[in-house]
Amino acid sequence: MSLTVTELVQYLDQCLQPDQFQDYCPNGLQVEGRVGVNRLATGVTASQRLLDEAVAWGADAILVHHGYFWRGEAPEIVGIKRRRLAALLLNEVNLLAYHLPLDAHPQFGNNARLGQLMGIAEQAPLQPGSPGSVGNIGSLPEAIAAGKLVGRLEKLTGRDALHIGDGEEPVRRIAWCTGAAQGYIEAAVAAGADLFVTGEASEQTVHIAREEGIHFVAAGHHATERYGVQALGEHLSERFSLQHRFIDIDNPV
């Protein structure tokens, strides 16, 4: 007997604990489809192209980091929203989305996975004691040139990164938060980080980095958030004997 979508959501809610976060969108089952789940597609964002590829593959459910129904979003079901929802409803495909809970999970989270891939084995919350904090901090085994770490990130993500700082300067204490978390740079400074990694930059981020003397790296919003949902999909595949496919829709931002 196949896994039901209700069982899948119950397991994910138990694993990711969405009730601990004040998020900008609903976490969990966002669009209901067929009852049974045998094929699970995962991806970063539930764009039309991802939906189309998942439907063509025969997915019963799609699990993403960026779903729908964001705070402040227009409620009308028109245009892009109508086309996306129609693709799901007409094909009876479930859409599940977990935003901040997937950023923060200590095993499958975007931050946990990016830290591991950067070579940081021991990780701690960037803002300990702050409920729902999603950033991490840790140390490399030894100090390396900042430019070497940036090169490691570029090889990992397959894209050029923006680096503010001297590439020859040694760094060891690293703070990071995937996606659009440039606002965490001051928390990274307060935590004593030598370098802060996130996905995007704002104009003022450059000035803060220069004036605080911290290296800043913007390695791509999409690029830094590919790893959590992929790891979670692989885990679900193993636990429930699901067919799993990670669909990577390239995004230069």
Image: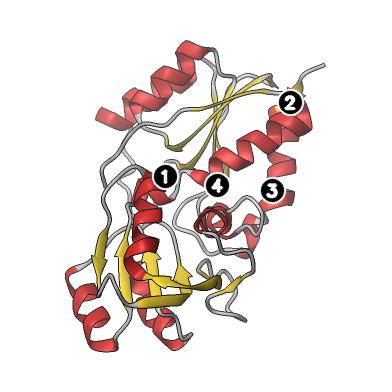
Q: How is the image coloured?
A: secondary structure
Element under disc 2:
strand
Task: Tell me if I can see residue 161 in this picture.
Answer: yes
- State which tag comes first along the sequence, 4 or 3: 3
Looking at the image, which is closer to me, 167 or 205? 167
- Checking the image for residue 13, the label placed there is 3
Q: Amino acid at mark 4?
A: Gly
Looking at the image, which is closer to me, 249 or 167? 167
Task: Tell me if I can see residue 78 in this picture.
Answer: no
Asked if the residues shown at circle 3 and circle 1 are in contact, with their CB atoms under 8 angstroms apart, the answer is no
Q: For mark 2, what is the residue? A: 4
Q: For mark 4, what is the residue? A: 228
- State which tag comes first along the sequence, 4 or 2: 2
Residue 67 image position (x, y, % from top left) = 45, 41
Distance from disc 1 to disc 4, alpha carbons, whole Å, reads: 21 Å
Dot 1, crowdedness within 10 Å: few (<14), some or many (≥20)? Answer: some
- State which tag comes first along the sequence, 2 or 1: 2
- Asked whether, in this view, residue 238 is left or right of residue 202, the answer is right
Q: Residue at x 37, y 82 (%)?
A: 186
Q: Amino acid at mark 1?
A: Phe
